[in-house]
Image (cartoon, rainbow, N blue to C red):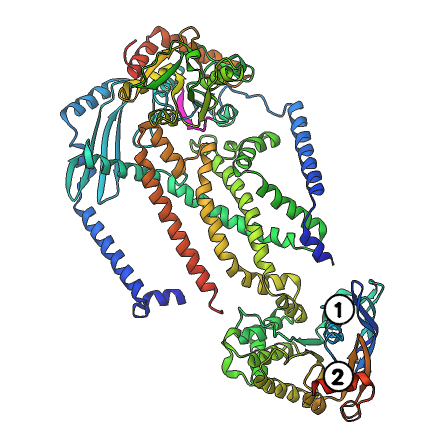
Amino acid sequence: MSENKAKKGITGKQILIIVIALVVIAGAIWGILALTGKKEEVSGMLMQEGVLNVGMEIGYPPFEEFAEDGTTPIGYDVDFAKALGEKMGLEINFVNTAWDGIFLGIGENYDVVISAVTITEERKETMLFSDPYINNYQAVVVAADYDGEITGFLDLDGMVIAVQKETTSDILMSDYKDTATIDITISANEKIATCFTQLKNGEVDAVVVDSTVAVVYAASNPDAYKVAFEDESEPEQFGIAIGLTNTALQTAINEAIAKLTVEGFFTENTAFWFGAE
Amino acid sequence: MNFLKRIIDVRGWKRASKTAAIVIMAAVALLAALSWVNVSEEEMLQSASEEMQEIIRQEEASSRKYVTVTYNSFGFIKYLSFSTSGAKAVKETYIAFAGQVYPADTGFLKFIGQMVNYTYRMLGSGQNILHGVKLTILLTTLSMVIGSILSIFLALGKISKNKFISKISSAYVFFFRGTPLLIQLFVIYFSVPVIFGFSWRGLFAIGDTEAVYKGAFLAALIAFSLNAAAYCAEIVRAAIQSIDKGQGEAAKALGMTYGQTMRHIIIPQSIRRMIPPLCNEFVMMIKDVSLVFAISLMDITTISKTIMTSEGNYLVFFPALVIYLIITAIFTFLFGKIEKRLSVYE
Amino acid sequence: MSDFEYILRTEKLCKSFGHLEVLTDVDLGVKMGEVICIIGPSGAGKSTYLRSLNQLETITSGKIYIKDELFLHREHNRTIHRIEPDRQKAMLLEMGMVFQSFNLFPHKTVLENVMIAQVLVRKKSSDAARRLAGEIINMVGLSDKLDAYPSKLSGGQQQRVAIARALAMEPELMLFDEPTSALDPELVGEVLAVMKKLASQGITMLVVTHEMGFAREAADRVIFMDQGRIAQQGTPQDIFQNPEGERLQQFLQSIL
């Protein structure tokens, strides 16, 4: 009887048809919307009058983290954003967001991303960057009692390496691994702190991370970590990520950065957050 | 009403309930007394050392704000810290208990201070409802309520004789049970706005600084509700089908319509059978809420990970465990009570 | 009196489950006030016949008339004619049913069990429903159990509540589907007593039963069903005193 049939539910074939139909419909809608350019041009360069909304993954010390009260963002980028806001005459609103999908939120949830973002050619295809505001190198951090010598990434051969997921460190190490230049095992983590704890606990042999971060971790935990190598041959630069069409905002930000440079803000900020230099 | 009467009728209570009530009341009284004698925030602030007061004076003159004052109060115990940021960080910590302020920079008192601070942050105290425990409970409860209402329709759809309705319902359940919740969350938060040309944040006032989080909460609520509906639909369907066929026949013989039969006869009886598996689902959901880290919301798990990131202190996970256990215990207790009330006729 | 000859009549009623034919060409007419007992070996199709009447089973072919009006006509598993839906509902309410396994609503008290359909289906006010329910429950002798849940009652009491529940809809015809088969022997009597009381009040009843004593005493007509057909029918005297036919004799011997 019909009731018995209904109990059997739907067959695999029917499910497949339904799924394919759904995918096709969704794809078609997506495609049409993309072609017709559904996104209206931003009339002003900001989503909100007089406010610069800044997307930030607040969990990457010393660039950005929450102070002990759990609500105040502090860090190099935080101070930079505030100085920038002052120069541009804008109020700054920090929007805490997960690193995954952080760039998807530009123009939706915030105007720009200031979150230790490395400028890469690949990223330039989908977003604009401000002029760089800090130089950074890829660095290798090992346990303080490590007695080997590391003079380049090739020396990492055979090691287990921790990196933060989707960062330039991750991309760099994956490149080395995929091209079989060196044989390494990569442990990619959500948070940079996890990488360092893995190192402390002996789960991994080394952490590859931005030098600016490496220096601070090593300085605050000299018993546990030391910086073994900084790749100064390939400097990386951090920039502010801006929506791909928002050239007006890019220009305004670059003017402000130029003024801050002249006033010596960056020298002072670097000294405050990273000690000397 | 009966319930209220039962509460007031202390003599009718079970012995264990009486003991529990006395212990709880004694504890509350003790904590209230300790809070009463405890020092005020102003007094605590004065315990800052000379050096720290000097640093604070300097900061006021400087353009850079680098001192964070953290004050966490549970009444009977209070935590206060001054911390500076930057490469040369300085920190001073105090706890106040029973009218005395103690420096808590080392040893056991430091540990106590950390526990107070971590617990305070994970509870989302001093913040709005979209933080910490409040977020976890709100999101779990709302999604389970919406989800279980939806699930009744899904379950009825699944057992419907109408092939189209039954297939659609089955496909829905299959889809949401067959894909990871995190991906569903991503699709709803990231893909759906692009496809339909809106933004979650845009649904709220533009000047509202919390609009981003409200938008994320709404997206999470939708994702969690839709997902819960699929899981609960199986529970509801099983419960409905476990009711003796004779019940439906008797109702039909009395002239009741399908809707009346479901509403007055079948569903009320099956609800009791749904409670234990729904409680399981609820407890699972409390933990699944931690997935909201992916869309910028801060639940208990996310806050504990954030603290771990900034302070590298793994002790933070212990208060998190205790908080989760307490929430789970409370809800398991409530579900048990509901089940008991629904089984009066058995 | 009534302006119809039969309250219920079936013509060539057939029912099969897949290839298994359970009922074959059952012709039967029930007159107002008649008490008919259907007896026969298990598997004869007695219960299926009863359940076909109030649409708990869908017949394969045949005609069902209610008050001489064609209610349903099916051939080869297709509906040829069906009375319009709103009248259909009203006509089905002319039949009340009592099940072998009582099927009381366990989450409702005795009073609620007897009230609920009056309120939901007959659209009575709950006061009116309560009044009638009270009278009927009193009639089946359970006035002291109004607020009890079914799980607190004995099987015999539950079946009496089930009878009250069906009576509360004020049907013209009561269908009893082996009402005492699920009961312990010492509880059968109280249910049969209620049924006899109904019979003596002139309520039309169609009873599938194994209680030959009841059939002999209360029935106007006894129908012997065998292998899906009406094998024999007659007064209790005809059937029990002078049974004709081998199958009926065998059956009566086995049961007495």
- Is residue B289 rendered to the left or right of residue B303? right
Q: Amino acid at mark 1?
A: Gln
Q: Which residue is mark 1?
A: C88
Tag 2 subunit: C
Q: Amino acid at mark 2?
A: Phe
Q: As rendered, which of A150 and B154 lies closer to the eye?
A: A150
Q: How many numbered markers are drawn?
A: 2
- Is residue C1 rendered to the left or right of residue A261? right
- Is residue C170 rendered to the left or right of residue A78? right
Residue A192 visible to the viewer: yes
Q: As rendered, which of C223 and B39 lies closer to the eye?
A: C223
Name the residue at 52% across, 60% down.
B273
Q: Is residue C169 above or below residue B92?
A: below
- Could you tell me which quadrant the C terminus of chain A lies in? top left
Q: Residues within 10 Å of mark 1 (few under 14, many from 20)?
A: some
Name the residue at 46% across, 61% down.
B339
Q: Is residue C45 above or below residue B123?
A: below
Magenta residues (range): A89-99
Residue C251's tag is: 2
Same subunit: marks 2 and 1: yes
**Helix, strand or loop at mark 1:** helix
Expressed as whole percent of the image width and height from the top left, the position of residue A163 reads 43, 22
Mark 2 or 1, nearer chain start:
1
Q: Residues within 10 Å of mark 2 (few under 14, many from 20)?
A: some
Tag 1 subunit: C
Residue C131 visible to the viewer: no
Residue mark closest to the camera, 2 vs 1: 2
Q: Is residue A90 magenta?
A: yes
Q: Is residue B72 above or below residue A125?
A: below
